[in-house]
Amino acid sequence: VNVTALIADDEPLLREALVRMLASAWPELEIVAQARNGREAIDQFETHRPNICFLDVQMPGRSGVEAAQHIGRRAHLVFVTAYDEYAVQAFAQGALDYLVKPVEPARLAETVLRLQERLRAAQPALDTEVLLQQLARVLNPDSRRRHCAGCVPRWAPR
Amino acid sequence: MHSQTTTLETEVELARAYLDLMQMRMPDRLQYAIHLDPAAARLHCPPMTLLTLVENAVRHGIDPSETGGRIDVDIWIRDDRCVMRVKDTGVGLKSVTRGLGTGLSTLRERLKLAFGANAHFALTETAPRGVCAEVSMPRREAGS
């Protein structure tokens, strides 16, 4: 079965770069749509229903986070961002992973593996609540305090 | 950039380099034009004046807009003064995001340091959408 993906980024150069990197890291993955903002990402998602969405967080008009809220658990979400403090929000939206720009091939390869594992296991997209709890534990191992958006270390889930 | 003064010619070069870079980022959303009156090219200007205005237009006007817009830079001499105008057709002042203010208040300070009360800066909203930033400063030859 073909695995399909959508890429949303307002910068065409970065979209092209991600397409190129994915072509080499995951040749079987079919990029079925590209979007320039959150609104287009939502439209394209509804049209193509891809398995995976790579969403830039900061886009003009509706953001990647808003697009993720709309898509919900209907696709595996990977946030792509220049700012790692968005990680908390990304996981709150049920993202499988997030990539910090500039995207490194080795880091993307990890993301690809993670996505392939989930698809192979036919697991649904991740659940918001569990992720938030995991994240809170990582950020505050000794307390049950809620996380704060400004103090997130560069961190990726395993 | 660390010097006390620069020429408008240098400021324009800097702004053009920045806008070229931004156009690479968003080729489908940004158009721009710069017109510098040749008579104003060698006039004195506090460093980063034009770049601050142009960066502001990109970050707060064009970047948040899905459709983008254009930026027009005009610099000319009016009587004994030099006028610098940066007009954009972006989202306007309503959608001011956090961060606006630092660049422009620093710009005001630099103008005050260079020209005292003799420099003016105004930011106005334009119809149907966008912002016009205008700086007016005394005509002063570089180095004088």
Image (spheres, rainbow, N blue to C red):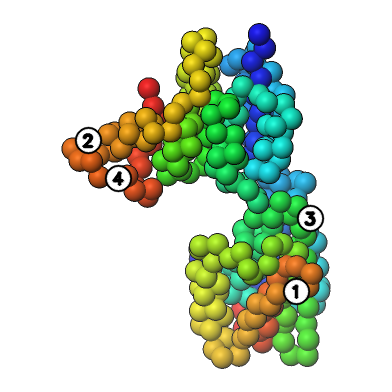
Per the model, the C-alpha gap separating discs 3 and 2 is 50 Å
Amino acid type indicated by mark 3: Gln
Task: Rate crowding at label 2 as few (under 14), some (14 to 19) or many (20 or more) other CA atoms within 10 Å.
Answer: few
Residue displayed at 61% across by 71% down: B49
Closer to us: mark 1 or mark 4? 4
Measured as percent of width and height from the top left, residue B27 is found at 75, 46
How many marks on residues? 4
Measured as percent of width and height from the top left, residue A62 is found at 63, 48
Q: Is residue B44 above or below residue B10?
A: below
Res. A102 mark: none
Closer to us: mark 3 or mark 2? 2
Per the model, the C-alpha gap separating discs 4 and 2 is 11 Å
The chain that hosts pointer 2 is: A
Per the model, the C-alpha gap separating discs 1 and 3 is 18 Å
Q: Which residue is mark 1?
A: B126
Closer to us: mark 3 or mark 4? 4
Amino acid type indicated by mark 4: Arg
Per the model, the C-alpha gap separating discs 3 and 4 is 44 Å
Q: Is residue B63 left or right of residue B34?
A: left
CB within 8 Å, label 4 to label 2: no
Q: Looking at this rendering, what residue extends furthest in the left direction?
A: A142
Amino acid type indicated by mark 2: Pro
Q: Which residue is mark 2?
A: A141
Per the model, the C-alpha gap separating discs 2 and 1 is 52 Å
Q: Which residue is mark 3?
A: B31
Confirm whether residue A153 shows in the render: yes
Q: Which residue is mark 4?
A: A146
Helix, strand or loop for disc 4: loop
